[in-house]
Amino acid sequence: MKIESTLEKISSALHRIQKNSIKNLSLPILENILLIAEDNTLTIRSTNLHVGTEIKISVKVEEKGSVAIKLDLFTSIINSIKNEHSIVLELKEKTLYIKTNKSEMEINIYPSDDFPTLPKIKEGLEFIIPIDKFIKGVSSVIYAASLSDIKPEISSVYIYKKDNELIFVATDSFRLAEKKIIIKGADDFPGVIIPVKNIQECIKVFNGIDDNVVFVVGKNQISITNENIYFTSRIIDGNYPDYNQIIPKEEKTSVIVLKNEIISSLRLINVFSDNFNQILLKTNSKKNIINISSRNVDVGENNTDIDAVISGEDIEMYLNHKYITDSFSSLTGDSLNFSFTEKNKPFILRSVGDASFLYLIMPMNR
Amino acid sequence: MNKIKETWDKTLAEIEIDISKPNYNTWFKKTFAADKQGSIFFVGVPNEFNKEWLQTRFNDMILKSISKHDSSITKIEYIVKKTQTSAKEIKSKKDSFQENSLPLQKSTVNKNNNLNEKYSFNSFVVGPFNELAYSASQAIIKKPGVYNPLFIYGPTGLGKTHLIQATGNSVYKNNDTLNIFYTSSEKFSQDYVNALTNNRINQFKNRYRNYDVFIMDDIQFFSGKEKLQEELFHLFNILYDKGKQIIFSSDKHPNYIIGLEDRLRSRFSAGMIVDITKPDYESRSALLKTKTTEKNIPISEEVVDYLATNLEGNIRELEGVLNAIIIQTDLRSRKLTIVEVKNLIKNNVKPKKHLALEEIIKIIAGFYSTDPELIYEKTRKKEIVNIRQITMYMLREYFNISYPAIGKEVGGRDHTTVIHSYEKIKKKLKDDPSLVQEIEQLCSILNV
């Protein structure tokens, strides 16, 4: 194998692929990426057997071939080369030669034929969806997904189509985030459950791209493809909990506060909160304020009032303030609306004037 | 089953020696023998990556090794399946005692076959009112395709859906390689319309034509939808020709579903048509007892007896009353007395519809598509006379109206005329099955 390419192309491709191959103790070859040179393209493949990515870049190919190289090693080499325009990779016997204008390197490599191929979906439904909208939807909810592996359904992001909206849902059973994004076409997009770890890779791989991409949904696998990138992930074969039934339909107390004020109060609260991040929230409709307090045995106590517009009965509730903070990036607009039904029942947090995002939080028991 | 497991274990033992340990652990450790059909051996693998790699890289090696142990195998197929031994539940270390979790309930509908797992035969009560339907479905579970199609009909709330879903679930339990699918006629038509608008009609056809057991609920909603009936007709023919099991349910006998094409009707009649009727007293009492033990409701014999005697409605109503009793028992945290139960029923059971006489006559005339006026008139045309007699019979038999009152209502006739008509129809019923069906049909329309 012998290729020549600009440094920039390789570096940006590596940037997308980074950390895709997490350490897989059982199969050391997976710490590598596979470079395949053929017909003026270099394909960089990486996989951890849960997700797989292939990125194609156009390069000058003098001799076809393939080589597997450790990802971290290759990345640090490429990142450390400064002020160079192009780079030559050449494979001779068991050594890979990397040449630039000023430096020459020799790397011992392992055989590449143990490197797995990526599965292609043979029978699946195809959809064209703008990837930036998809990523926006996923990033709006992803923090709410559970991180444990016990229930694979909820350590995932659930995506389904309803009317003209693509709906993204994630929950760890203590809070739930739902984002709706209007998308043309893709009418019979089936409900898919993608593991949260895999979809994080997807965001990284397609970061900054805003083309239309092709989604293929098969029975156990989903793939996302554009001109240069092929991404594939396993999908969970299961049922997502029927979450719509737990969203409260009525509202007894509605509280509207400024987002900035609650952010700064919660920052202060954070200093005083205990291991469970517990705070007590009380509304006071006479004074039109909400009062947030927290206690930490080691530090002390804190009491903060926030101006608010309150309608309905007064209510008090223990909750995990971390859950609120998590959702700030998804809540657009400058004021937030809390709507409560009853003590110890889940409540809804939304942005005023933005119906596309819904955040449901379960209170804590004292 | 054990034999293929043994073959696969031997093969694995051999492969383990030949390849490196990491390779074996990654690619082979989680595989298992799934099935064997003729010369094809099916290997279950945990994911698509695994499948792809075994196919491209290890296929020859596996084949070579496996054919030593079983020479009949000439081909290996890989299927992605969850491992048979489910992962041990690890207890969450998270301190969750302070937090309530959202009351998310896992939905019990299986995504592949659309069957709801909560419907099983464990909670199905068999009585004289449904035993024929029950035994037909048992026969199908033993041998799919014996009664093809199986057509179950009966009024709402008597367990049709429960029976057909439980049948599907049991068939699946016996043989999970069968491709089973449950759908309602509404969902089917939605699918069809979606397929039409998205130009995916071929995919739609292929999908439905691949099922081994096809169950469709509430088929009466197809009435008058010609294009859908045509689609169902073709689907039916293809599945039927391949000997696939088809199960339908409806609230009426196919002959009485208005707006159903004749060719479909005759096909439905080709297999087995069974009905589920309203449960009798004994079945109701048995039903109540099963439900109360299932839900663990403290309820006295006396109350069960009272409910069984007084609630003649369908099973769904029975369940509604039981739910009301649960809530009341919870509320008062003691057993309910019979007086309280009586009070409850008063609020829970819909009073029987009281139809005005003219209404009844209008409905009967409508059923025979004649003008109700003709029934009141003195015409003695044979067909009208017959309808008039049936009307009188119905009024007497099911509405308990006195002979003179009927005579007066139906065109001012003498009470002896009414008695004659009543006796005549009663006699005719003994040897005219089509008349029996007509009367039954009328009864269900009139809700008696």
Image (cartoon, coloured by chain):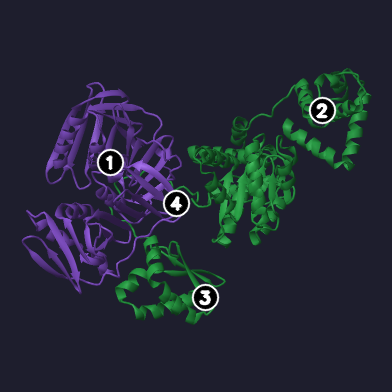
Label 3 near label 1: C-beta < 8 Å? no
Q: Does mark 2 fall on the same chain as mark 3?
A: yes
Horizontal placement of A154 versus B320: left or right? Answer: left
Look at label 1 and name its amino acid.
Asp
Looking at the image, tell me whether mark 3 or mark 2 is earlier in sequence order: 3
Q: Which mark is residue B18?
A: none
**10 Å neighbourhood of mark 4: few (<14), some, or many (≥20)?**
some
The reply to whether residue B157 is visible in this rendering is no
Q: Mark 1 and mark 2 in contact (Cβ < 8 Å)?
A: no
Separation (CA) of disc 1 from disc 4: 24 Å
Quick one: A26 or A94, which is closer to the camera?
A94
Q: Which residue is mark 1?
A: A210
Q: Picture coordinates of residue A159 (x, y %)?
A: 38, 44
Relative side of A293 to A355, left or right: left
**Mark 2 belongs to chain:** B
Distance CA(mark 1)–CA(mark 3): 50 Å
Residue beneath disc 2: B395
